Image (tube, rainbow, N blue to C red):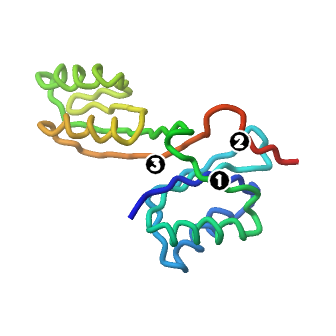
Amino acid sequence: MQKKVFQLLVDNTSGVLSRISGLFSRRGYNIDSITAGVTADPRFTRITIVTSGDDEILDQIEKQVAKLIDVRDIKELKPSESVYRELAMIKVKASASERQGVIAVADIFRAKIIDVSNESLIIELTGNQDKIEAFIRLLNGYEILELARTGIAGLGRGIENVTYLE
């Protein structure tokens, strides 16, 4: 089993995300993460899907998704030719005496403290999946109350593979 990251440019229409995820569901394919957002041109949405399988399954996924009517472009974002990022927001239980330790760990990872209450902190961290996983492991001694992760968003490096839609 290997993972692939696919970037889709699709028409920004109602139900497009449902149709794409429905294709995965009907075929029994797994979605590890999916992110979607409008592009600089509001007619189009960029969707980043991380999926896993053997070579045959991953090739089939790419071909099946490309056939969907709303899909204007699909490409694989290879790690060596792309930049991936994920956002995580982590609510950590921390008393006044524990707070400085959590803040020290956050500083090492260039994370931001975005909310403070008497009993907890909310930390915002952006980076690749390995960075986020390492940060979460370092919080092992603290109680994580809530965790929200966006999934991967990615873009290819340079201008060679930019897709222009008319």
Lower position in the chain sequence, tag 2 or tag 3: 3
Q: Are marks 2 and 1 in contact (CB under 8 Å)?
A: yes
Mark 1 crowd level (few <14, some 14–19, many ≥20, 10 Å Cα) = some
Badge 1 marks a residue whose secondary structure is strand
138 to the left or right of 133: left
Q: Report the front residue among 72 and 157.
A: 157
Q: Is residue 53 shown left or right of residue 120?
A: right
The numbered disc on residue 161 is 2
State the mark number for residue 75: 1
Give the residue at x 59% y 74%. 23
Quarter of the image for the N terminus: give it: bottom left
Helix, strand or loop status at disc 2: loop
Coordinates of residue 40 in the picture (x, y in percent): 74, 38
- Residue 151 - label: 3
Label 3, label 1: how far apart the Cα atoms are: 18 Å
Image spot of residue 109 (x, y percent): 32, 25
On the image, the x and y values in percent for residue 41 come to: 79, 41
Q: Based on the displayed image, in which of its 4 quarters is residue 15 positioned?
A: bottom right
Q: Amino acid at mark 1?
A: Lys
Q: Who's the residue at 68% across and 63% down the image?
A: 16
Q: Earlier in the sequence, mark 2 or mark 1?
A: 1
Q: Could you give the CA–CA distance between mark 2 and mark 1, rounded to whole angstroms?
A: 9 Å
- Hey, which residue is sitting farthest right in the picture? 166
Find the distance from the CA under tag 2 to the CA under tag 3. 22 Å
Seen in the picture, residue 28 relative to 44 is either above or below; the reply is below
